[in-house]
């Protein structure tokens, strides 16, 4: 299939005046001309670091060539989380059933979004290469849909409540979570707080009447079954995680799978890759307590004590009523770093760090606003996806791989609703993500190579 750059059409998304539509076309042509230029073909194989030239990128924007051949990688990362009662990534304290915190009940309007799943570092080992999938009704691989991203979103809807847009506090059963800047939670796809079984009085604004929220099931029961399904106590079933990641085109609205993948990287001492996965899980849902605890362990590997303290405090605050069963893991981590068990008055945190810690400039902001604005006037999802892909190329070319990967996922999210070409286009984007990881020396390059083999019609 010959993929071409998106064209701006005024027939359906007409601007108020013809001149404005013409300006949009000119802006699109100008910005794509700025971002897209000739570059060498994408290298094959995993040893690309030696061929990297500073300032260059092997990521190609969409162009005339057909979609690249899907490569087959392996998910040889393993992790064995501890018991279902512990969400720590590096310690395995005994189960704890005593909850100590009150948390937020979200508004009655449930929105599938986050997940939960604390995990602990397992014995280091490996899994066999991931075989190509056998195809499913949607054209994506996967033996079953159990615990795919959609299923995880339904689990979240059952066990949690989404924070409403106008929330300024999070209070459950008369206790307010010590979280500052509650409003910034809305910048994440799925800001959902999990609650333990029972009836809870939740409030999101001072002075408002509490809303009664009923949770009818124990999250721990589902969590234990999920652990068994992915064999988190042994050699984690990386092939199943990869299959579900491919089915979602690497766009998650629940953090379960990302958290397990992060644990699998940690199990083989790939701490930087593990940290990126835990941050991604927290970008999806900043209130996902197990990933905060796991991220704290990663930060301690880099001797980032202050940041680790913040993350373990967040893990404690969001573990409302010990809903995740990780109170023992949190307590153990506090002891390791000599952190008192007193509750802080307020915890400051910035959700932007869960996307990327790479610097951005005013010019970057203008380019992002322009490209995203122009993409809104593309009629077809395929065209919008191509524009967002080219935006990601800008960050790949300027050696900011984390931001590039995030915008590539934005392109994939759009392509999920595209027509028959979505699989070929998605494989192209995934190949760009693989190349970006190779250039940056990220261990996730194999993951995206594998996904190319699994995303197919």
Image (tube, rainbow, N blue to C red):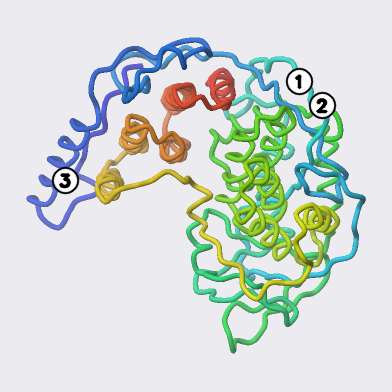
Residue 272: quadrant of the picture: top right
Residue 175 placement, left or right of 388: right
Dot 2, how many residues are within 10 Å of its Cα: few (below 14), some (14-19), or many (20+)?
many
Under tag 3, what secondary structure? helix
Residue 269: quadrant of the picture: top right
Label pair 3/1, CB-CB below 8 angstroms: no
- Residue 161, how many percent across, how many down? 66, 64
Label pair 2/1, CB-CB below 8 angstroms: yes
The disc label shown at residue 126, or none = 1
Q: Kindly report which numbered mark, 3 or 2, lies closer to the viewer in this rendering.
A: 2
Under tag 2, what secondary structure? loop
Q: Kindly report which numbered mark, 3 or 1, lies closer to the viewer in this rendering.
A: 1
Is residue 151 visible in the rendered image? The answer is no
Dot 1, how many residues are within 10 Å of its Cα: few (below 14), some (14-19), or many (20+)?
some
- Residue at image point 53% right, 62% down: 185
The quarter of the picture where the N terminus appears is top left
Residue 262: quadrant of the picture: top right
Q: Nearer the viewer, residue 422 or 88?
A: 88
Is residue 338 visible in the rendered image? The answer is yes
Residue 20 placement, left or right of 276: left
Sequence-first tag of 3 and 1? 3
Under tag 1, what secondary structure? loop
Sequence-first tag of 3 and 2? 3
**Residue indicated by mark 3:** 24
**Residue indicated by mark 2:** 235
């Amino acid at each position: 299939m010959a993929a071409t750059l998106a064209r701006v059409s005024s027939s359906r998304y007409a601007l108020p005046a013809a001149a404005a539509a013409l300006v949009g076309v000119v802006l699109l042509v100008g910005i794509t001309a700025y971002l897209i230029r000739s570059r060498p073909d994408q290298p094959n194989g995993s040893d690309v670091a030696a061929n990297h030239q500073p300032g260059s990128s092997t990521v190609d924007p969409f162009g005339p060539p057909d979609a690249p051949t899907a490569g087959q990688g392996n998910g040889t990362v393993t992790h064995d989380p501890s018991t279902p009662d512990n969400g720590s990534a590096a310690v395995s304290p005994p189960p704890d059933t005593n909850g100590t915190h009150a948390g937020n009940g979200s508004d009655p309007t449930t929105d599938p979004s986050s997940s939960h799943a604390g995990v602990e570092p397992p014995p280091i080992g490996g899994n066999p290469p991931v075989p190509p999938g056998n195809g499913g009704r949607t054209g994506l691989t996967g033996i079953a849909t159990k615990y795919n991203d959609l299923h995880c979103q339904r689990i979240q809807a059952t066990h949690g409540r989404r924070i409403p847009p106008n929330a300024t506090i999070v209070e459950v059963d008369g206790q307010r979570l010590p979280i500052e800047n509650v409003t910034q939670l809305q910048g994440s796809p799925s800001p959902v707080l999990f609650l333990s079984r029972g009836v809870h009085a939740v409030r999101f604004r001072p002075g408002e009447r509490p809303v009664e929220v009923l949770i009818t099931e124990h999250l721990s029961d589902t969590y234990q079954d999920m652990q068994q399904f992915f064999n988190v106590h042994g050699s984690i079933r990386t092939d199943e995680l990869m299959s579900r990641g491919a089915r979602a085109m690497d766009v998650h609205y629940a953090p379960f799978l990302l958290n397990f993948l992060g644990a699998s990287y940690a199990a083989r001492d790939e701490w930087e890759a593990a940290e990126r996965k835990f941050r991604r899980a927290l970008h999806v849902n900043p209130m996902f307590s197990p990933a905060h605890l796991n991220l704290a362990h990663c930060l301690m590997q880099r001797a980032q004590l202050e940041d680790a303290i913040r993350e373990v405090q967040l893990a404690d605050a969001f573990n409302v009523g010990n809903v995740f069963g990780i109170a023992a893991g949190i307590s153990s981590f506090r002891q390791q770093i000599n952190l008192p068990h007193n509750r802080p008055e307020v915890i400051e945190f910035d959700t932007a760090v869960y996307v990327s810690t790479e610097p951005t400039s005013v010019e970057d902001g203008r380019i992002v606003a322009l490209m995203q604005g122009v993409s809104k006037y593309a009629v077809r999802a395929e065209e919008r996806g191509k524009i967002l892909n080219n935006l990601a190329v800008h960050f790949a070319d300027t050696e900011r791989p984390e931001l590039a990967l995030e915008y590539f996922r934005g392109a994939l999210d759009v392509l999920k609703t595209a027509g028959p070409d979505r699989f070929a286009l998605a494989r192209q984007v995934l190949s760009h993500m693989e190349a970006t990881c190779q250039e940056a020396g990220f261990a996730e390059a194999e993951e995206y190579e594998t996904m190319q083999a699994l995303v197919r019609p």
